[in-house]
Amino acid sequence: MQWLPENRSSLYGHGAFAGVVLACYADFAFNTRVNGEPWQVPVVFALGAVYLTLNVVCDRLTAGRPPSWLRAYYAVQIAVVLTAIWLSPVQGFFGILGLPLVSQSIFDYGWRGLPTVGALVYVGSVAVWFPYGWAGMMRGVVSFAPGYLFTIAFTFISRQALLAREQSEKLAAQLGAANEQLRAHASATAELATTRERNRLAREIHDGVGHYLTTIKVQLDAAQALLAADPARAADSVGKAARLAGEALDDVRRSVGSLAADAARPPLPEVLRKLAADVQPAPDLRIEGAPRPLPAATEHALYRAAQEGLTNVSKHAAASATAVVLDFRDPARVRLTVLDNGRGAAPAAAGSGGYGLRGLGERLALLGGTLRSGPRPDGGFRLEVEVPA
């Protein structure tokens, strides 16, 4: 397992490796006690070149390969460095040639690199002094121990510092990504809140002002048709239109106030009776079950549903009879139904195709309610909503 391949492949790591190797081989130029056969010197220099080259190409040899490739690299490097130490005509200082390999193994394997690479290189380097007897062996042990201990301690400290820096950079990157995600979520939340508020205002304008304008238009059309034949009834229609305009203004104020006035709204049956009185043809209002107080949002949604149904009847149905049924019999839910005997579904009102029904469906969905609409089997149209209550 490779722990810090990016550190092993850095220019700093290669430079440190090369620095120790060159320092060892520089001893040939300054040491006057060069013994051995003439062939040993070029062989030792060749081994040093192989040793250094393998370090430089180690990443390319092992990257993306199975762990056995890295183990093979260390096996070859241990063999090369110990052979160079044993064949070197220069003894003593040359024994530190294995220190860079020990340091590299710690970067790659942590503590697990010491029992294998560290121990083998250290013992192999000290064993060079075996021909000089136990005194020579102890001299080698004492001479090389400080260098190896310092290298091991320094390498572990460097490794921990590099790991800490890597972890810090990773955490900083994660924190940056998290902050970016939070900013994106905040932007999306703000956009969603804006969209919801726009939709709410659109529903309020359509369900409130749209209903009143439709009813006012019906009254004014009636007044225009009756003006010549029956001025009294025409004046009555104009009066109703004026009163409805005032109610429309009140409705706008309620909408602008974010429905704050809903808590002061009269009971829903009373509000529906007032609504029905302004619609032509006047619908038959039926209350089934014992009326009970409802949450303001629920009453408002049912009121808007009745408005939407009656507005569609006035605009599209050409009906002669209309009914509004408010059903309290289910203790868990309240149902409101608008029925007519008109021509059936108008193109803009059929199913949920019209904006009004679509907006009404969104309003009910926020309360956990449902909307059903469509032609009646015996003719006409049916709008039915249910909300928990």
Image (tube, rainbow, N blue to C red):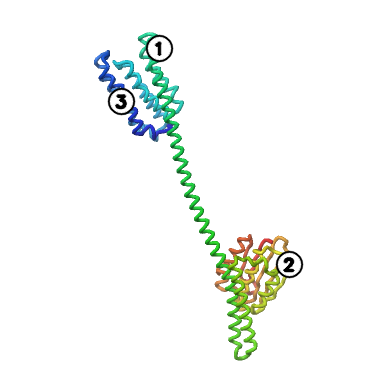
**SS at mark 2 in the image:** loop
Q: From the viewer's perspective, is residue 211 above or below residue 331?
A: below
Q: How far from the left and from the top, in percent, is residue 214?
A: 58, 77
Q: Quadrant of the C terminus?
A: bottom right
**What residue is drawn where x is 70% and y is 69%?**
267
Please say whether residue 312 is visible from this viewpoint: no
Labels 3 and 2 touching (C-beta < 8 A): no
Query: Which residue in the protein does label 3 denote?
Result: 50
C-alpha span from label 1 to label 3: 30 Å
> Which-is-in-front pick, marks 1 and 3?
1
Residue toward you, 289 or 211: 211
The type of residue carrying mark 2 is Pro
Lower position in the chain sequence, tag 3 or tag 2: 3
Q: From the viewer's perspective, is residue 41 above or below residue 366?
A: above
Asked where in the image residue 166 lies, by quadrant, the reply is top left
Asked whether, in this view, residue 40 is left or right of residue 343, the answer is: left
- The disc placed on residue 138 is 1
Q: How far from the left and from the top, in percent, is residue 327?
A: 71, 67
Lower position in the chain sequence, tag 1 or tag 3: 3
Dot 1 alpha-carbon crowd within 10 angstroms: few under 14, some 14 to 19, many 20 or more: some
Residue toward you, 188 or 349: 188
**What residue is drawn where x is 36% and y is 25%?**
100
The type of residue carrying mark 3 is Val
Please say whether residue 277 is visible from this viewpoint: yes
Asked where in the image residue 20 lies, by quadrant, the reply is top left
Residue toward you, 94 or 31: 31
C-alpha span from label 3 to label 2: 97 Å
Query: Which residue in the protein does label 2 denote?
Result: 291
